[in-house]
Image (cartoon, rainbow, N blue to C red):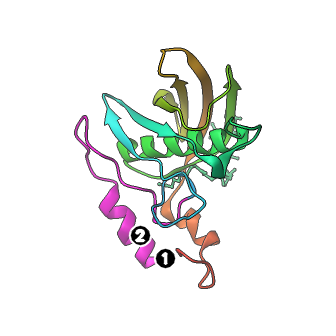
Amino acid sequence: MQALLAMWSEKFVGYPDGSDLPAHHDHCLGCGPENPHGHRLRAVRHGDGVQAWHTFDNRHVGAPGIAHGGAVATVVDDLYGFLLFLEGGPAVTRQLAVDYLAPVLIGTTYRLDAQVARREGRKLFVTAGATAPDGRPVITSTAVFVKVSVEHFAQGISPDVPGD
Ligand SMILES: CCCCCCCCCC(=O)SCCNC(=O)CCNC(=O)[C@H](O)C(C)(C)COP(=O)(O)OP(=O)(O)OC[C@H]1O[C@@H](n2cnc3c(N)ncnc32)[C@H](O)[C@@H]1OP(=O)(O)O
């Protein structure tokens, strides 16, 4: 727990526009560099939001040649998680909606954008989208994140789980 607190206190700092944002942690399914099943999403601050360029590979296939919808939702959820570095503290997904407008193709690089639409108490109402190379939107999303203290994450920490 102390290690987690220390790690996050280093990550929730100011990030200038255009700068790389850090992974949530090494084993994060969305962005962790040490997770062999993960997406290794990398995001940058883009104005008041975040932006990423992402290519799904065959580990995340659903129908042949097409990314699994759950994998796409994972990446969108994790993209929202990068907004928290701009917000200055942790929050967790309470509600996530994804509209799949067109297939997300394996091997094609998509641009993803996310931003905070509204803040209300502990709640962050966030929106995101993914855009194909030809400019077509393929995904839109909304979500509600709820701010939590770092102690929220103590319930998931076990000495037997890698990355804890
Ligand atoms: C850097 C930090 C790490 C980031 C990692 C990013 C990875 C990507 C994100 C994730 O994967 S997070 C993991 C998946 N999510 C979870 O595990 C969250 C599980 N849920 C909970 O732990 C609790 O439900 C939660 C902490 C979110 C809320 O519980 P609480 O008991 O603290 O609050 P409550 O249930 O009263 O709800 C908080 C507020 O949200 C409101 N709310 C709930 N559902 C809503 C909804 N669907 N739409 C709008 N508002 C909603 C609710 O009405 C309330 O509003 P008020 O504060 O105004 O009263």
The residue indicated by pointer 2 is 5
Q: Residue furthest left?
A: 16
Residue located 53% across and 26% down the image? 130
Residue located 37% across and 68% down the image? 7
Disc 1 marks which amino acid? Met
Q: Label 1: few (<14), some or many (≥20) within 10 Å?
A: some
Q: Residue furthest right?
A: 63
Name the spot of residue 16 as percent of width and height, x first: 22, 39
Membership of 20 in magenta stretch: yes
Is ligand 1 closer than 8 angstroms to the Cβ of mark 2? no
Name the spot of residue 35 as percent of width and height, x first: 54, 64
**Horizontal arrangement in the rendering, residue 27 relative to residue 82 (left or right):** right
Name the spot of residue 13 as percent of width and height, x first: 28, 52
Question: In this picture, which residue range is highlighted in magenta?
Answer: 1-28
In the image, which disc is placed on residue 140? none
Q: Main secondary structure of the magenta part?
A: loop
51 and 56: which is toward the camera: 56
In the image, which disc is placed on residue 1? 1
Name the spot of residue 80 as percent of width and height, x first: 51, 40
